[in-house]
Each structure stands twice: as C-alpha cells, then as structure tokens.
Image: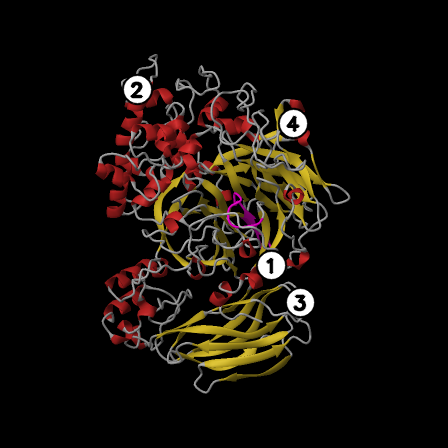
Amino acid sequence: MVNLNRRNLMKSTVAAALGASAVGVASADVDETDTPGAPSVLGDLKRFSHTSFGAEVTGPFVFQNGGLLYSLQHPSTGTRGDGFSNGGAKANQPPYDRAGVGYFSGFAFKFDGDNDDFEELGIPNTVEEQGQVRSANHEFVMLAQAREEIQGGDERLGVTQTPDGTDVTQSTFEGTQYGGAATNPDCNQFVPTDEEGTEGYLFTNWENSPGNVTRVPIEMTGDGEWEADLENALNLANTEPLRELGGTRINCYGDLTPWGTMVSSEENYAHTRVALTNTVSDIVEAGSGEGLVAGCQFWNRPNPSSIGDAIGEYYDEGWNVQGYWALTGVEFLAYYLGAARVDQGEDANTTEPITDVYPNPYRYGYHVDFREPAAETPQPIKYYVMGRASWESPDFVGDRKTVYGCSDGDSKGIYKFVADEPIDEYDDPMQVAGTLYAPKVTNDAASVADSGSRNSPADTDLVFDWLPLGHASNAECEAWIAEYDDVTQADYLEAHSEWSEGDEVTDEVLEAADRTVVEAGNQNYISNEEIVEWAEQYEADGHDGVDEELRKVPFLETRAAAKEIGATIEFNKAEGVDSVDEAGPGDFVYFGISEFNDDMANSEGDLQMERVDGGVVYRARLDEDYDVSRLEPVIVGPDFTDPAGDANDSLRNIDNVYAMRDGRVICCEDGFAESNRSYPNDCLYVYEPPTNVQAGSLAVAQGESGTVEITADSLPDGLSGGELTVELSNPEVATITDASYGDAFSLTVPATVEDDGSAASFRFSDVDEEIQDGATDVTLATVEVEGQSGGTTDVVPGIPALDDDDGDSVTVDARRGVVVTGPPQLGGGPGGSGRPPTDPDGDGKFEDLNGNGRIDYDDVSLLFEHLESDAVQLNVDAYDFNENGEIDYDDVVELYRET
C-alpha cells in the first residue's frame, strides 16, 4: 500500500514503519507526554549494527567499494587506574573493551539506494551479545586500537604529548582531563592515494582535551581485508604545525571536503558565555551575571572546572554554569603547549596559577582542515572565519563555498558560512573570506497556538531565514584572536582581585576574583559592553556597518552575538549534518537533533513544540544558491516513556549522520542507555528515504502555455507501473490543456484531462523494463498548463498506486510544485511593444516588465509608473520583489538593485 500523505506516514504505526522486536523490561522513568508521531519514519529505517556496553557509534565511513568502518568510542573498561579507564559496571568481551576503529569484514553496500543489501540485526538479548560489536552476518574487525605503539614505540595512538615527549595523561600530570586520554575516537575520513580507493590515509578524531587527530596508512589486501601500518601512524597533535596553532581540543565529528581533505571539528563546549537563552544584554541591564554567566568566563581561572562547585558555595541559590564541565583539560592543554608544571598537592589539583604559557580561548572551537593530507606532515588550517562554537560537525557542499555547521549542547545554533570564492581556490587559506550566518526560525507553526497547545516535531517543518552576522577573512580573524595570546591564569587573579604575582592564592583571593567576574565579566577577554555595543550598531546599520574594532565580535563570540540580534539559538544537541559528496541544488542536507527538549520544547522563544527526548532527523533541500530554508522531519525518535515495543527499534538520540552516494543515510546513536529499551547498546541504522514524486514549477504569462513535469527522484527497485493524478489547486489562475506520459512507458491508458482543466489522470506500465533498479530522475508524466489570470496555483501530484519490479508498493513522498501566472502587459509596454512581462531567472517574480527578455532600467521605470495600477496591485506574487507580502515603493528599489 502506498501512503499518499507524508503526515499520515509520519503517524503510521511503529510496527509498520520500523519493524518489530521482542518487548523487554521498561528501564527509564521520564516525566513526559506522549508526543504524536514519536517514534515514526518517513521512509525505511533498518538496524545494521550495535556497539558494546558503554560505547557510542561514531565516525562512520563508507569506502569506495562500499565497505563500512566506524569508531568504537569509550566502551566500558572497568576501573584500571592507569589513566585510561572509562569505567563501566559491565565487562565487554575483548577486543570490544578498548576504544578503536574497525570495519565489517566481507561487507559492502551496493549503492543502489535499497536497504536489501544487508540483513537486519536483531536486538541483543543476552549479556554476551551486549558485550560485543555485532552485525547480522559480518564480523567487526579492529583495524587500529587506542594507545597502540606507533613511531617506533615513542608514541601511542591517540595520546598527545608535551613538547618534550611526555604523555599528557592523568598518570603523568595532576589535574582534570576531558575524557581519559585516547578513549574517544570519533570521526573517520579516508583519503585515498590510488584511483581504486584501496590504499591511503585514515584520519581519525580523538575527542579529548588536549585533542588529537591521527593519520594511519591503511590498504586493502588481496582477499579484500584492510590492514593498518601503525609504525608509520602520526599523532598530528604532536607535530609542530598543529602545536603552532595552539593544538586542538575535543575533536568530534568532521567532513571530507570536495577538494579531498579531512576537516576535524572542535566541540568546545566551554565557549558558552551566557547560560541557556539568556543574553549578554541581560547581564548588562541587571548589572551582574549572577544566575546568568556561563563557563567561558572562567577559562583562565586556576583549576577552572571547579567553578561549578564554587558558585554553589558563593551564592545561596547557585546556578548551572553552562559549559563549566568542559573546562576540564584546559590546564592539560597548557602543559601540551609547554607550560611548566605548577606544584600540586597530593592527589589534588591546586589553585597555584600557571603564569608562563596558557591557551587562548579564542583559538578553540573551529573547523580544522588538514591540507596536503599525503605529505610527510599534513598542514592544518583553522577556519576562524566560520565562527566559534561547540562544533559537532560541518558539511561542505558542492559549490565549495557554502558550509553548514551544527553546534552541540543546550541552546545552541545551526550556522552557515558562505565564502566569497571557492574555498580551495584561495592561494593562501588564511585569505578565505566570506559571510557568517545564524538562523531565524520564522514559521508560525513552530509556536504555541492560541489555544495553548503545542505542535509535534513530527508534524512541523522549520522555516529558516539566515541572519548575516558579519563578513571577514580568516587572516583578519586570526589577528583579532592574537590580541589575547599572552593571557594567563595570573591575569585572571590580577585583573579581578587584589592579588599580585608571588602572593599566595588563598580561598578568599579566588572567591574575590570569581565574584568580580560574575558581576562585571572577565576583563581579560572581549567585554560584555563590546558585545552589546556591536548588537546596537548591527540593529542600526546592519552587519557591515559596525565599527572596525567591533567586527571581531560575531566571529570570536558567535553564540553570544547571534543571541543578541534575536537569532534562534535554541537547538538542543544539534549533532549531525551531512549531504552526499559534491551536493548540489536539489540534493538534501540532513540535520540530526539528538534531543528535542529543553529550549526547543518550553514556552519561550521561536521553538515551542512538544518534547521528544529521542530526537529528530530533519532534511532540507539545497536550492539554486546552495541555501536551505525549510527543514522537514523524516525520522522522529521515541518518547522516553514509550514502551520497549516501540523504543527497541526506533532511532534514539541521533549523533553522526553520513549521507551515502546513493541517497541513503547512516544514522548513529549516542543514547547513554536512556529510554525504555530492553537493551543498553547504541546502534547504527541505515535510513532509506522514500521516493520523492515531485511536480515541477512554472512561471507563465496570461494566455501563454508551458509544461510541468512529474518526476520520481529514485527508484531503487525499478518500476513496474502505477497510477498518477495531477491537480491544480486554483484552476481560475491556470488550467491543464494537455497531458502525456514519460518516454519509458509503452503500455498506457490514454491520459485524461478534466473538462475544467483542473486535473489529469494517468495509468502506465513499464512492460519493456526500461526503468531498472537504481533508476533516478524518471519522468512519469508531463502536463501542459495555460495561464488564465494573475496569481499562483499549486501543482498537486497524487499516487494512488506505484509498484516496483518485485511487485511491492513504493513508499512515496509526493511534493507539490507551483505555477505563477504573470500579469498582462503594463500600458502596452514602453514604445507600445505589447509584450507581456516575463520571469527571466525563473524565481516566480516578473522582473522583465517590458517583455524584452532581460532586466533593464526600462523595467524599473515601468513599475514606478504603474505601481498603483490594478495590473500591479492585484498581482502581488509577481511584483513583490522585497517579499514583504505587499506592493510598495521598496519593490521599485529592489528591482533597481537587480539591474
């Protein structure tokens, strides 16, 4: 059965949409409503693998031959006391008790868009199964494991070192560390060195602080297995080029660029300046940051991550200092850079300040591109100009200029950067220049209705506008950052208390400094007042009208700046973004929101919907400018109150998303054993999108005709036949005058057109088997449309039936097109041409008012002359060039700008 309505499909039963598995014992106790549409899938979702106890599924990569690889991140190891322990109450079976990167022996995706190329894995029911990495039919083979000896035994895989070669671990230094050293492998990207893709370099992120990226030579053997050359592996953090950039921290996911390099993203949670949805102006207006200030303000505090406990002692109520926990490892980062060890107490991290070398906070939280990936030492470049955030991942799309990025954590953003020129064409990457954008969710459907009820994320698209934050070059950003290079922990104490270098750091001194920072901000870095002044100038003069000395604000304090101008910085754990390689107009970009709760599901801000703790996967189609403006939900996770029968087979807490070249999407979980599943393991699923049956769009003058095609974007199992209808929602604007079939169909029933031209019907069969497995962009039918009066009408495809070559129903997502019918000629046109206006660029607006086929000054004059006429005022869709919903003199100005 083909489901015609995508909303009905989203609400279909879990058993139908997701499959079924054994019902287990409920394990979670979450106070939450039963959200309509949670869980649900638009398309097909199939479980390929699960990890061992305590481990996330991270870093999926699909080789050229279809083989699959991913990271086993922080599996439970028990308590070993060696500086590498990840704990865990349950024991995993070796080798799945130690972090590493592995592949599935003997398996390869077929790249035909169909999930029939693997057998679905059942849920793990026994402790033995739960302590392994499993797929249905293929063994997970470890390719490289954490802390294996490399470089002749001088280093260990994934472990950072100080300049003198000392491992930076808790067994060699006192202090806090973000994750046990080399316990968190994440992103994997393979850069081949041969045309077949059978040998090259595997780049892997290590999500720790100090962070790391490793490069391991690997090659495929004659029997199709993979081997790693660990002797020649590199810890890139221990190379001089990366150390000179200040190193890196919390390297999470990343991307393979269109120019063939690995980009590693720094998930610097400690960049948060103001907690949750509060703004810097809230602090300035209140005259204090009490209850508002967040973690980054304490970056250079001695023992910075202890500020969370200290705040609870200083203030009666206390508050959650957002991101303070990610200050763990900052002092280790200083030692990695060469700071002298400060004296430590026995088994304790004291507050004696580091005064010689200390990391600059504005050097962390970026996308890091490893240029010259096959050189003896790859050359890293940080894209400061793309903004500073807790980047989970970027997506570099096919124009080589546009980059989408997701920032992980509570109340964070989804950002866009557009370079002035293709990024890889700049002779010097430091000269990369462009505009940074933040999102504004504008659709009313995302808000609470007048009744006070909330919409379900499963039923609500998110409509975006993009707010430009600023334009700069990478070199300009680096110069702004360098202003803060020499700040140390001594500066924190001296600027905010009566302490002088050489004095003892007493509890009273530290409290005095902390309270000053809470009340007035950290004076060592960009001030609260600078951010508020930037926002005021932005509102008055636009992003390109701010004072020169304030241009740094949106690039170095991206989240705080975006919130000040009203951007939608409410996303909770935006953890995935990806599209097919070299994605172009019409392709989808997938966004993964791990948890749809907190500021996305409260009663404030732009997002006020029902809560889905299991998260949502959205997709957005790239337009001609590589922009995305509408995010539609395609996978909705479970409510954590859902029973195991629903939760066991649904995608829970999406992390990485990976778009394969055949349009399918690998979806990885980071679930922390939450929800009512009967098993604790995270899983890897493969999402097969539905077939999109798309009606084209058309702009046509009154009395003129044009054609609209109805196409299917992908048919993984071919097509045997079906039925199709095409309806115009407003036949007073345009009518169907003729209808025909796609060239592939030799057996058809004559297409019929309704007497009033409002609809057409088709029935067809592919008896000659022209449309085979994996077919794409298939024309099913074409209708001829004639413009009747000015306005717009939707073109609505309907699919009563559509069967593949196996006789199974094709899951379809039917998508409307639009016909814009232009107005009659104005005043006969200049010189009495009598030509009707035209739409030269196909955007639905009739810029060519005089009908001469181009946009020129005569068009501007004609619009100005006839602005108050019915021919213009009654055709808002045709002449509303400023897109404010009405005709006004600014439309004349906008058209003039286009000339």
Q: Amino acid at mark 1?
A: Ala
Dot 1 lies on which element? Answer: loop
Is label 2 in contact with label 1 (beta carbons under 8 Å)?
Answer: no
Disc 2 to disc 1, C-alpha distance: 61 Å
Give the class, few, some or many, for how many residues have Cα within 10 Å of label 3's Cα (few <14, many ≥20).
some
Picture quarter containing residue 193?
top right
Is label 2 in contact with label 3 (beta carbons under 8 Å)?
Answer: no
Tell me the mark number nearer the camera, choosing from 2 and 1. Answer: 1
In the rendered image of this protein, does residue 853 appear above or below residue 243?
A: below
Please give the residue where the numbered disc 1 appears in the rendered image. 20
Return the disc, 2 or 3, that comes first in the chain's sequence: 2
Dot 4 lies on which element? Answer: strand
Please give the residue where the numbered disc 2 appears in the rendered image. 508
Disc 3 to disc 1, C-alpha distance: 30 Å
Q: Amino acid at mark 2?
A: Glu
Q: Is residue 713 left or right of residue 493?
A: right
Tell me the mark number nearer the camera, choosing from 2 and 4. Answer: 2
Q: Position of residue 508 (x, y in %)?
A: 30, 19
Give the class, few, some or many, for how many residues have Cα within 10 Å of label 1's Cα (few <14, many ≥20).
some
In the rendered image of this protein, does residue 877 appear above or below residue 595?
A: below
Return the disc, 2 or 4, that comes first in the chain's sequence: 4
What numbered label is drawn on residue 150?
4
Return the disc, 3 or 1, that comes first in the chain's sequence: 1
Q: Amino acid at mark 4?
A: Ile
Return the disc, 4 or 1, that comes first in the chain's sequence: 1
What residue appears at the point 56 percent right and 48 percent down from the top-left corner?
668
Q: Position of residue 869 (x, y in %)?
A: 24, 74
Tell me the mark number nearer the camera, choosing from 4 and 3. Answer: 4
Disc 2 to disc 4, C-alpha distance: 47 Å
Q: Amino acid at mark 3?
A: Gln
Q: Which residues are magenta?
A: 657-678
Residue 667 is one of the magenta-drawn residues: yes
